Amino acid sequence: MPQLDEVASEIRVGQPLPFDILNEQGRLLLARGQIVASAAQLAQLIERGATVDQAELDRVLAVKAANPDRAPVTLFDLWAQAVTRLEQLLASITQPGFPARLDRFSTDFVALARRDVDIAVYLTVRQNPNRLQRYGLAHALHTALVAELAAARLGWADADRLRFVKAALTMNLGIVELQGRLAASDLRVTEAQRAELRAHPQTAVDALRGAGVDDELWLQAVLQHHERRGGSGYPAALQEPAALAVALRLADVFIAKISPRASRDALTIQEAARQMFLEADGSPVAAAVVKEYGLFPPGDFVQLASGERAVVVRRGADARTPMVAAITSRIGAPIVQTVPRDTRQKEHAIVGAAAERKLVVRVPPERLYGLA
């Protein structure tokens, strides 16, 4: 991997990073979209022997070569920056004006997601296992995306959709850092951590009320998003949680199931969808999520009849025939340039899930979608 001092010219102090910065063992120090705050911090990273992934560097240089006169910002850059923006927003909850700042962020986030929904879905399905320390932030954004897509499909009013998104962004605001530590570790949860997890719905509601949030439906959804009909949930073992809380739990759990962690691999979309239906408690949100993601959503890794393995990049008119990009040859060897394939054609029909899913992590999404 290239040393950071070799590529320091690509970093601008005070501006979002164009790539991840790793330590000598390849563990994440700063994620793409985070900010190096000062020249001293950059010098310290270089002194510590920080590195950059070669594929990440190649992507940045390719973007730069394609736009020599300006620094382009792709949708993938904006998504990476959204993680940092959310981190800064949640950290400001004790400062005046938090509800208004969250309204602006939520509106901007929905607009970003709607710029290209296939790319948004891809980023929830094809999560980078090297960024688990930022799991809590990414999880909030991905759950908010599911909330927006499901609510829109169900025809909810704009105010109700935005409330659902804001509830998703804030449901775990007291345990974001803990979520990252747990996701990146394969150690068992301690009793103290378990107690913190069980208390987090009330902690979040208390923080939101303290920040001036007075929307009772939003607060109720956050407080009850781990309750289950029949009384098996927490923190209050409610028999009948509110409808928005049920919807929020479904979105939350669905994203959790398809997200990798150090202790386990992500479930396939198909298995996560099956389990969501079993836990739906009659909520129409489950069916809406499945219809939005489809049988083979963007980011899914599939085997083609041709022998090629491919990544789904666009949902199709038919759930079984999305557009894909082949990333291997017919004999399964990785190829440098991805090749678009139309799965409506018999030769390129999807015959099942592909193995060795970690192969996809090494393919920058810009190679699949271009400089979106």
Image (cartoon, rainbow, N blue to C red):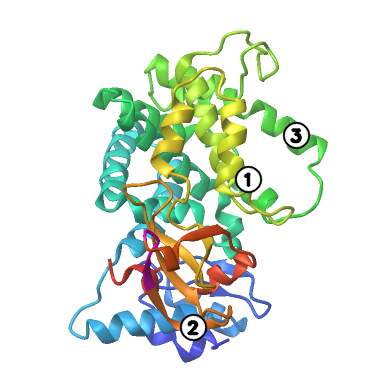
Give the mark nearest the N terminus, 2 or 3. 3
Q: Amino acid at mark 2?
A: Ile
Classify 232 as above or below 111. Answer: above
Q: Give neighbour class at mark 3: few <14, some 14-19, many 20+ (Cα, 10 Å).
A: few
Q: Give neighbour class at mark 2: few <14, some 14-19, many 20+ (Cα, 10 Å).
A: few
Residue 80 makes an appearance in the image: yes
**Which residue: 29% across, 71% down?**
371
Label 1: which secondary element: helix
- Foreground: 304 or 364? 304
Q: Position of residue 55 (x, y in %)?
A: 49, 81
- Foreground: 265 or 309? 309
From mark 2 to mark 1, how far is it between C-alphas?
36 Å
From mark 1 to mark 3, how far is it between C-alphas?
11 Å
Q: Amino acid at mark 1?
A: Gln
- Foreground: 85 or 230? 230
Q: Amino acid at mark 3?
A: Arg
Left or right: residue 322 compared with residue 128 = left
Q: Which quadrant of the view contains residue 26?
A: bottom right
Q: What residue is pinned by disc 1?
A: 179
Q: Are marks 1 and 3 in contact (CB under 8 Å)?
A: no
Q: What residue is pinned by disc 3?
A: 194
From mark 2 to mark 3, how far is it between C-alphas?
45 Å
**Which residue: 41% across, 70% down?**
17
Residue 145 makes an appearance in the image: no
- Foreground: 209 or 78? 78
Residue 150 part of the magenta segment: no
Q: Farthest left residue? A: 69
- What segment is highlighted magenta in the picture? 340-344
Q: What residue is pinned by disc 2?
A: 335
- The C terminus - image quarter: bottom left
Point out the frontmost of discs 2 and 1: 2
Q: Position of residue 279 (x, y in %)?
A: 61, 25
